[in-house]
Amino acid sequence: MSRWTMLADLERCVGCQTCTAACRHANATSPAVQWRKVLDVEAGSFPNVNRTFVPVGCQHCADPPCMHVCPSTATRQRPDGIVTIDYEICIGCAYCDVACPYQARFLVHDPSFAYGPAMLSETVRFDDARMGVAQKCTYCSDRIDFGLENELVPGIDPRATPACVNACIADALIFGDIDDPYSNVSKLLREQRHFRMHAEVGTEPNFYYLTGQANGAVDVLPASAPALLQAQSGRVRTRGVEPWHQEHWNWKAAGNFLCGGAGTGLFAVVAITALNGAPPLIGGLLALGTVALGLSLLAFKIGRPFRFVQVLRQPRRSWMSREAWVAGAFFPVALVAVWFENQTLLIIAALLGIGFLICQAMMFYASKGIPAWRVKTIVPLLVATGFAEGAGLFLIVAAFMPDLQPFAEPIAVALVILVSARHLAWRVYFDELGRDGAPTKTLEIYGVFAPWFLVTGLVVPLWLVAPGFVLPSFAPALFALAGLMTLVTGWIFKLILVTRAGYNQGFALDHTPVRGFGAAGPSVKPGWHSH
Amino acid sequence: MPVSKPRDERTVSSYCYQCVAGPDLLKVRIENDVATEVAPNFDAAKVHPAGGKACVKAFGLVQKAYTPNRVLYPMKRTNPLKGREHDPVFVRISWDEALDLVAEKLNAARAAGVNDEQGFPRLAASFGGGGTPTAYMGTLPAFLAAWGPVDMSFGSGQGVKCYHSEHLYGELWHRAFTVAPDTPLCEYLISFGANVEASGGVCGVKRHADARKRGMKRVQVEPHLSVTGACSAEWVPIKPKTDAAFLFAMLYVMLHEHRRERLDLVFLKERSSAGYLIAPGGFFLRDPQSRKPLVYDLKSGKALPFDTQGMRPALEGKYTVDGIELGPDSELTEHSKAIVQPAFAHLVAHVKDYTPEWASAICDVPAAVIRRITNEYLEHARIGETIEIEGVTLPLRPVAIALGKTVNNGWGGYECCWARTLIACLLGALEVPGGTLGTTVRLNRPADNRWSSVKPGPDGFMEYPMNPTGKNEWLSQPTVRSAHRTLVPLIANSPWSQALGPTHLAWMMQDEDFDQLPQASTPDVWFVYRTNPAISFWDTKRIGEIMAKFPFTVCFAFTRDETNHFADVLLPDCTDLEGLQLLRIGGTKYVEQFWDHQGFALRDSAIPPQGEAKDFTWIATEIARRAGLLEKYNEAINRGAHGIRLSGPSFDFSLAADQVHDVETIWDATCRAASAELTDGVESQGLAWFRENGFRVKPFSRLQWYLYPKVVETGLRFEQPYQERMLRVGKELGRRLHERDIHWWDRQLEEYEPMPHWRDLAALWEDALVKHYQVRIEDYPFWLITARSMQYSWGNNVTIQLMKELAGNVIGHGSVVMNESAAARLGIADGDLVEVRSPLNSTKGPVVLCEGIRPDTLLIIGQFEQWETPFAKDFATPNMNALVPMLLDLTDATGSSADLVKAAVTRVGRAA
């Protein structure tokens, strides 16, 4: 079986953007939608400066996170390794966008043309199926298929070769079958030094960067490389290269996590108290309403809301799909449980709610394109904050419902435990980011937020809960205030997580290329904090 | 799955020649009669040096055809007031009315005499882009030929934005209108600001990419880290306009720090004038009988004519000999027992003070770096080695030096071009495999073949069509408004000469008094095509004010722009994908176009013209007919004024001279002639064949890439190192000018040195600015320079959205590029809005901070600040053209200046 692979020879590339233009033509993408483009990366300090041109685009990963997260099955991987997208199925949730470490997805909501109204050439090529969905490079799979059907060799015969490769005036882009040891790409990979971008993320791209002769002097400057890397945030031209904030998951998407966490957490608390005799109806309905509100926000946010049902198509892989399935079970079971005060169903519903919460946490973990999301420790943190928010919300509700007052004290105790656990999870999470590396701007945002997380998320709730035990008459208000602080802190954290700390991977080079003569240069990874 | 809609589609062959690095052959995809895609022409993969690839600019042609901003109908001005501030109030008119208007003015001009009272042509024409408009103007050249004298001296960038000194001296020394390394064989290239990755087109880019993979070391010497610098093995950030000092120091190292055997002494003795004895007056010592330059023969111990067989010429030493010296105006001096030295010895003495340490203080480049690079250069020269090219053994010298704009034009251009060519001669690396080559000829004739232009001239050198400077031959009365032949002997007299200039003089003479020259008149009719001097020249504000005074301007217009704002009539011609034309391709051409084939390519009319746009050939025919020149026009076509002669020894497809021929008839006959020319008359396929196949070629011998075999065959020498001819010409020119009491060209006369001395160019620039603007030069601490962009065809495609989008990926476009440390000292942050100010004018734009630029240098890429061109006028992009003063003091002897100025920068707004 063939596995189609692209090489970008950084020693050859001159950054002319002819590949970008050819891609725009061949795929009729909208203005500024560049499935293929070439970065202009400068690193170093005058006069020791290195400027490198780096073609980027979909890397057609062997283990593509975009496919794993896609809830609708729109993103697929062909047996030949090409990652495709079906614009008729895609719901435009942009989950693939945050899952891609290479910033290779484009979500275009509205038609746009070069000069306002569509020109003749744009009218002929306009495709409404591309609107409101995630677009990406397909390695011009239609050309490859045409070529194979006509016994042409992709990468050799232009009619069977991606447009960007055909157009490259420096012969810097090379395409071929990496499974064929005698192919053009296999030969070049044997002969030349190369790397794959962001190899540490582990997606196994079918896209390699050539950087010069393997037998040439290769001086990657390991000692100075970290220093250079550090220097880049302030001293080096990094626009378009350093991580920038993900653009598609906004406050509405965050709302799903705010409400989902608090709502399912509340339902779990309601279920526990109901097992001990508390009336579950009001708290349960509030929990369900909260979760439903979050999902509604999400539904209105996606590019193709009327295809929402497609979200159910991929429970085998996608945590978003799983979230939808769990939500589908959670709502009816929970509704019946609270309405009929059925304890068994309450337990099942609570477990489904916890499952929903875990799905949401795992959605972040699966987002390989966002360093602040993809770490394992995000999962316990989000689960802990969901429970803490649920307890907090319960204490707020209890302040207005005398029936629930007897349960306030134990839940307040639980709140103390949960906010402590949450803070511990936060510290573990924050430390992991600092230890393993993250975009500098993510850490800066968190650096500002961290003291508040301590104060409003832990110290103040503890400070409010404690006097509640010795001043019973003030307990409902104090507990409710503690709950409110817990809830607000959790929500602010998740809002920050999605809309402020969600910087993408950016672009990086293992090392800069040889240019005809001499040595390869140091690594370049602008906008990152690393130890 | 990917979108794959069934399409009613076909492909059409075309070419892109938007810049001098073309033509690129391409295919246009047509869907339902609409052009949708541009792609390489892989049918030409085996014959095109870059495998049939097309440059990024070609991909803008689809938008160019369909942009809503096009001028789609003939228009005429209704507001008689001309000026930037006056709306011309163009109104739509019919083609008949438009052409009648033009014909009426032409006929009136013709009736009054084709030259006016001052002797200047009444018809003027300006075409931009290094001659590339001829690839789009169909048969207009035939109309111009039929008309007679046309003033083409109103420049639009020439001189200040071209390789001006290189054009002139390159043609003189080695038939090199432009100069290129023999990249496929070169191993060590020093590039002084030559930005081949931005301006070398698809051929240049591919040749250099291949060379990098082969291990060629390229050192980029340039004030900023350009695209080419980025792709080079080493970047040497030199102070602007000090390249000559670096090159002189290289000469010093080669001549004073190494054994003579490191040089190619055979080449120097046999193929240069290094052995010619220099008489006490500075001219060659000559044989009294034959008047040939003398060489001292070590074998016989005598001074013998240079072409005496079996000599062992001396390159160094002092010799006491007899002979004569021929000075200016053939003044003869007899020398008896004069003590003389060969030119080479003079050279050695000439450079003795130009040490790397001396150069380091000027260039701000460490002496050790200059010395190391020179030594590396020598190590790669492979003196004595040979290579076989098509069965002929030639020297292999894989070292070359390339010069870029601002280095090879304006003051200092002579020094750099001389040193570059001389270094090639010292190593025998001129016009041989691996070395420094010329690309094409434009001033010598015939223009389509470098070898054929090699004709024996005086003193063993090649003939050169120098404008006369003799007492009774000098052209005291300028023939066009730039006075090019009067002032610049080296500009020659080919059709290209007046377009080279000094073209800014044509503008300056409109509003400045040049003592003892006739006050220049305005042309009665001015044609403008594919050029926008109101934006692209220097001191653009002044240019605009001058063109507003022209009485009748006809602009062939694709969109409105800053120059056609002053037009009286706009004629919408077909754009690149709409028009029809056959173009000569292959051989060796500008930049790095070295083909193994030559022939013709068709630019087929891929799509119907939008609106009422007309094919240029139709327009030219109609103008000729209405101007009563149809017969002469057809005869000019038959002679090949449009590119291909319609008859030859074994074929004749001439058109009837008295008839109006339609576009396809003209190009069908042309295609037939092209087929016949390529097949010696055996075949004669016409337009239909070319439409089917796109192009037609025959082999072109790679030997012809190199001039050396032809020079050897003709027994000639390269005119290096001693410029005796230029010395004589300069002296004579000075006499002629002074006889006429013209002294304003005296500074330019100083350039006529047999071997150039270092000139403090920074002081020259600064003094000129202080003198003309009474400024404190300390207030302008930066050098403002510019650079080419691959995405933008100068200013011609700024209205294409795709180009702006793509250029946005290459950092520096749309901004002022500045060193981060220098900016920090001025409190400027990345993205801030800054004002860049020269003594003449100012421009504003966002600043991009980077480390790849000298702290004393500012960079603004491209040609912008449009105020009328649709789309581009909304860019808010800075542009340096309005900041560069057009001054005689900044004009060199070849009539050019360099695109740089002293400037200050201040922050005027915070980053958004």
Image (cartoon, rainbow, N blue to C red):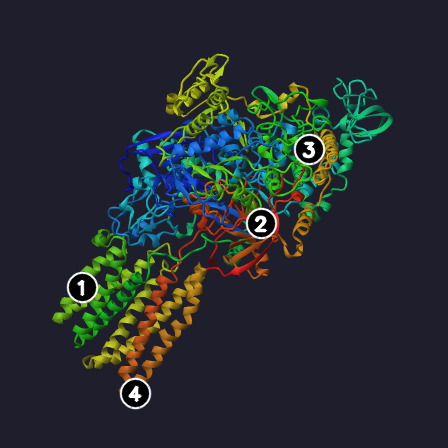
Cα–Cα span, label 4 and label 3? 99 Å
Q: Residue B188 appears at what percent x and percent y?
A: 61, 36
Label located before the other in sequence (4 or 1): 1
Residue type for callout 3: Leu
- Nearer mark to the viewer, of 3 and 1: 3
Q: Label 3's element?
A: helix
Residue type for callout 4: Leu
Residue A331's tag is 1
Residue B422's tag is 3
Cα–Cα span, label 1 and label 2? 71 Å
Numbered label tally: 4
Q: Residue A160 appears at what percent x and percent y?
A: 35, 33
Q: Quadrant of residue A397?
A: bottom left
Which residue lies under the disc numbered 2?
B883
Q: Label 4's element?
A: loop
Residue type for callout 2: Leu
Chain letter for mark 3: B
Cα–Cα span, label 4 and label 1? 38 Å
